[in-house]
Amino acid sequence: MQHFDVKGMTCQHCVRAVTQVVQDEDPKARVEVDLSKGQVSVESSLPADVIVGLIGTEGYAAKAV
């Protein structure tokens, strides 16, 4: 499981957007979002830098932790 701090997520639309962009690249990925903490956890074979880039395409600033 990889963990990321993500800035700018405020609602369920944000959760869906982040989840979908990762799962579009890896349909088997498991994505968990904690809005209150601004954290995303991803279980995927994708490297962390790719996930950060994907989340960035949705307009959110992400960094691996």
Image (cartoon, rainbow, N blue to C red):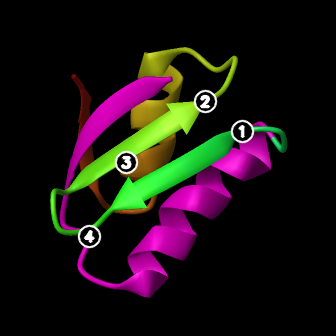
The dot on residue 29 is 1
10 Å crowding of disc 1: few (<14), some (14-19), many (20+):
some
Discs 3/1, front? 1
**Which sits in the foreground, 43 or 61?**
43
Q: Based on the displayed image, in which of its 4 quarters is residue 5 positioned?
A: top left
> On the image, numbered disc 2 is attached to which residue?
43
CA distance for labels 1 and 2: 6 Å
Q: Of the residues under marks 1 and 2, which one precedes in the sequence?
A: 1
Tell me the amino acid under the disc marked 4. Answer: Met
The dot on residue 9 is 4
- Magenta residues, as a range? 1-26
CA distance for labels 4 and 2: 19 Å
Q: Are marks 2 and 3 in contact (CB under 8 Å)?
A: no
Tell me the amino acid under the disc marked 1. Answer: Ala
State whether residue 45 is above or below residue 31. above
10 Å crowding of disc 4: few (<14), some (14-19), many (20+):
many
Residue at 33% across, 85% down: 11
Q: Of the residues under marks 3 and 1, which one precedes in the sequence?
A: 1
CA distance for labels 2 and 3: 18 Å
Q: Of the residues under marks 1 and 4, which one precedes in the sequence?
A: 4
